[in-house]
Image (cartoon, rainbow, N blue to C red):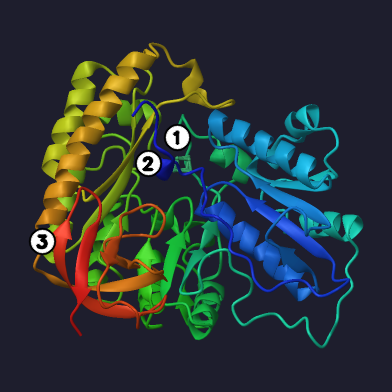
């Protein structure tokens, strides 16, 4: 494989799933949602508001009066993909409103596509809605335009992303998100819990907690307590865990207080799953990256977490070929991975991103060296994953059903986040299953990334 595979790219989002067809004469909007799960949450919010205002949502270009393109600007390749998505929407529909991360650079967009109707930046919901109102005036029908209980979702009904904060207080040198999205802004805990409770009432069985830095949740509002809910990740995780759905934590940095989350996992309140973007293991590389918690003794932390919760699944992403990365530093990363035995791993070859401070660092790594390190890293990660999954055969575990078709039920175990991790397939006696069911299976077979099993309850 010569490049980062699409399923490991954070800037490629799940495909939108749209609701019911438009009535005759109903103003209709299309949405192309690029980017990470956080951008997907923004798209959901915009669509929820539009649905509440009486707009229909079109799953294709032809049925839409205008199309919103929610863009990603994280990597140069993602920017190029965003420009090409805007171009496609212009060709296919002609009336295009651009929002999202790339909207922070309007001239970049209008330079390439002068015919776009409007450009708004990340999280400028009101401005996007204003642009839609101008392009396609609303025509609400009070009898039928009731907002569904859980709003409009681009994810299947049984799982939903839950954004708890926006922005980031760090300044990692390869990242321009703080420039685009600003400093950390946490949502009040009571608002997050209320949204989560509504989602669960509406049928959601799995909540995926996302932010740029989940461990830092509430720091900006001094962990304020309001209406009985404190804005601290430990308290929030406990509050969310009491709602009865699976709760999965993404983008958690290994700060010391993460230890307090682990008992909640062994108690079953929160899934025993941590998505921690380690990015590297060599302290010098982490320092050159200006990573948060760069000095953390991560192997000791991991061992301490596993002592408390032996079933903990750890997922992470890494960057190989960061400027100045020596062979010895890369070897430290490989050795670290051997010891850390992470369950799920994604890896990127370092790329310059316009505006990132790492572009100016000396000693950029040659493309073929990056590729070689990526191959070696992924081979090791794959071998670890295969051994870990093979050890699951014969075990009985809970899975959530995502999809059922003629051939199999596609499910996930507690160790698998949607879109980024593996699956468990049930290809016999699955006809009574439906998406959102949580059932116990016995694992019968394993590959590098996926499992197969049969229902036993
Ligand atoms: S922690 Fe670093 S990589 Fe993550 S959003 Fe903040 S600056 Fe970017």
Residue 250: image location, x then y, percent: 39, 57
Q: Is residue 140 above or below residue 128?
A: below
Q: Earlier in the sequence, mark 3 or mark 2?
A: 2
Mark 2 lies on residue: 292
Q: Are marks 3 and 2 in contact (CB under 8 Å)?
A: no
> Which residue is painted at 85% across and 66% down in the image?
27
Mark 1 lies on residue: 172
Residue 123 showing in the rendered view? no
Ligand 1 has an atom within 8 Å of the beta carbon of the residue at disc 1: yes
Mark 3 lies on residue: 307
> Tag 1, which secondary structure?
loop
| Mark 2 surroundings within 10 Å by alpha-carbon count, few (fewer than 14), some (14 through 19), many (20 or more) | some
Ligand 1 has an atom within 8 Å of the beta carbon of the residue at disc 2: yes
Tell me the distance, in whole angstroms, between the alpha carbons under discs 3 and 2.
24 Å
Figure quadrant of residue 44: bottom right
> Tag 2, which secondary structure?
loop
- Which residue is most to the bottom? 143
Tell me the distance, in whole angstroms, between the alpha carbons under discs 1 and 2.
8 Å
């Amino acid at each position: 494989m010569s490049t980062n595979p699409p399923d490991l790219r954070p800037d490629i989002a799940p495909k939108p799933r749209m609701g019911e067809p438009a009535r005759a004469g109903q103003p209709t909007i299309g949405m192309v949602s690029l980017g990470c799960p956080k951008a997907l949450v923004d798209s959901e919010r915009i669509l929820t508001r539009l649905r509440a205002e009486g707009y229909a949502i079109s799953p294709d270009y032809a049925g839409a009066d205008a199309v919103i393109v929610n863009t990603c600007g994280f990597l140069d390749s993602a920017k190029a993909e965003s420009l090409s998505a805007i171009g496609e929407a212009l060709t296919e529909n002609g009336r295009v409103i651009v929002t999202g991360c790339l909207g922070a650079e309007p001239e970049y967009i209008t330079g390439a596509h002068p015919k776009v109707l409007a450009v708004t930046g990340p999280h400028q919901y009101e401005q996007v809605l204003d642009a839609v109102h101008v392009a396609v005036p609303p025509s609400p029908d009070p009898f039928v335009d009731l907002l569904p209980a859980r709003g409009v979702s681009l994810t299947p009904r049984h799982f939903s992303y839950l954004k708890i904060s926006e922005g980031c207080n760090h300044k990692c040198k390869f990242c321009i998100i703080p420039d685009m999205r600003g400093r950390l802004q946490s949502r009040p805990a009571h608002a997050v819990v209320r949204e989560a409770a509504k989602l669960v009432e509406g049928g959601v069985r799995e909540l995926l907690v996302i932010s740029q830095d989940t461990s830092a949740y509430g720091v900006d509002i001094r962990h304020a307590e309001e209406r009985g809910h404190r804005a601290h990740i430990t308290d929030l995780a406990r509050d969310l865990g009491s709602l009865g759905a699976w709760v999965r934590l993404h983008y958690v940095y290994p700060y010391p207080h993460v230890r307090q989350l682990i008992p909640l996992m062994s108690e079953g309140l929160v899934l025993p799953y941590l998505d921690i973007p380690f990015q590297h293991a060599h302290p010098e590389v982490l320092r050159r990256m200006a990573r948060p918690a760069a000095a953390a003794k991560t192997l000791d932390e991991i061992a301490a977490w596993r002592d408390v919760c032996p079933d903990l699944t750890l997922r992470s992403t890494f960057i190989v070929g960061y400027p100045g990365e020596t062979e010895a530093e890369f070897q430290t990363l490989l050795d670290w991975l051997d010891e850390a035995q992470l369950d799920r791993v994604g890896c990127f070859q370092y790329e310059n991103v316009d505006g990132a401070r790492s572009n100016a660092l000396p000693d950029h790594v040659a493309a073929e060296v990056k590729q070689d390190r990526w191959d070696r890293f992924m081979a090791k990660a794959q071998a670890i994953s295969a051994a870990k999954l093979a050890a699951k055969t014969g075990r009985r575990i809970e899975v959530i059903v995502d999809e059922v078709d003629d051939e199999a039920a596609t499910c996930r175990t507690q160790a698998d986040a949607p879109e980024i991790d593996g699956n468990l397939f049930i290809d016999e006696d699955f006809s009574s299953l439906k998406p959102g069911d949580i059932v116990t299976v016995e694992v019968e077979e394993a590959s590098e990334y996926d499992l197969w099993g049969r229902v036993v309850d």
